[in-house]
Amino acid sequence: MACKRGALIVLEGVDKAGKTTQCKKLVQALQQCGRPAEMMRFPDRSTTIGQLISAYLEKKSELEDHTVHLLFSANRWEMVPSMKKKLEQGITLVVDRYAFSGAAFTSAKPGFCLDWCMKPDVGLPKPDLVMFLQLSPSEAALRGQFGEERYETSVFQRAVQQKFEQLMKDPSVNWQVIDASQNIEGVHNNIMDHSLNAINTAQNQLLGELWK
Ligand code: FDM
């Protein structure tokens, strides 16, 4: 490795937990302390596959459940070459949702098991750190109404939360649970501490393969 690699850092959590706000703050704070960092999000709605997913989420189109699951995974795989390149260049990637959302959301649908849902993402770049922003359904409700997109109902979000809890039992992934009920700065400080640790550790390690 010519230079020290960047870390792959993922934020997961149920709706209203503040993932996007925290991803943005983290990238800014890392850049301000001289650590190159960029934000990514999945689904990446800018690609051809991402546009199919976006239309589905906005309920403008219907897709069979297995099909859309595989499209979400393909949307991650299509970004792998550029992700690897950036990590090799020493850029830390802060990612808003990843394969864990993929497995949790589809397996919350009737007739899907977690194991099947994880399979298409086996071998993706393995995050050095996955932070789960924890927020109880009652606290989430205090943050306002759900939006209009598919999956944005409290019943479905509770099922998703249970699937995330199952995924978090996997010791091969560096999970950290963050209390998202604190104020924005409190959550940010917590996230920043974990991220700086992960960046320092990752620079001396090879990038792993997820769920392999
Ligand atoms: N989602 C997201 C999935 O169902 N599978 C996936 O692999 C990913 C990455 O898409 F409801 C769901 C989760 C959420 C929606 O919403 C994307 P945001 O607001 O763009 O994160």
Image (cartoon, rainbow, N blue to C red):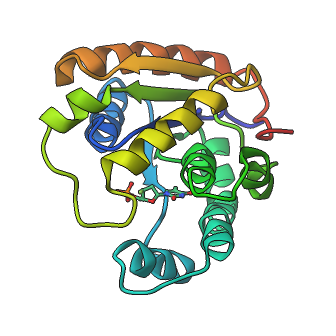
Camera-side residue of 164 and 111: 111
Camera-side residue of 169 and 80: 169
Q: Please identify the quarter of the rendering in which residue 198 is found.
A: top right
Residue 92 placement (x, y as % from top left): 52, 37
Residue 19 appears in the figure? yes
Tell me if 3 is positioned left or right of 12 in this view: right
Residue 209 placement (x, y as % from top left): 80, 40
Q: Residue at x 19, y 24 (%)?
A: 184
79 over 135 or under it: above or below: below
Q: The N terminus lies in which quarter of the figure?
A: top right
Camera-side residue of 41 and 150: 150
Residue 128 appears in the figure? no
Camera-side residue of 70 and 163: 163
Q: Residue at x 60, y 43 (%)?
A: 100
Residue 191 placement (x, y as % from top left): 38, 20
Tell me if 41 is positioned left or right of 197 in this view: left
Residue 136 placement (x, y as % from top left): 32, 26
Q: Residue at x 59, y 53 (%)?
A: 102
- Count of picture labels: 0
Q: Residue furthest right?
A: 212
Tell me if 197 is positioned left or right of 153 in this view: right
Q: The C terminus lies in which quarter of the figure?
A: top right
176 over 93 or under it: above or below: above
Q: Residue at x 66, y 62 (%)?
A: 73
Q: Please identify the quarter of the rendering in which residue 65 is found.
A: bottom right
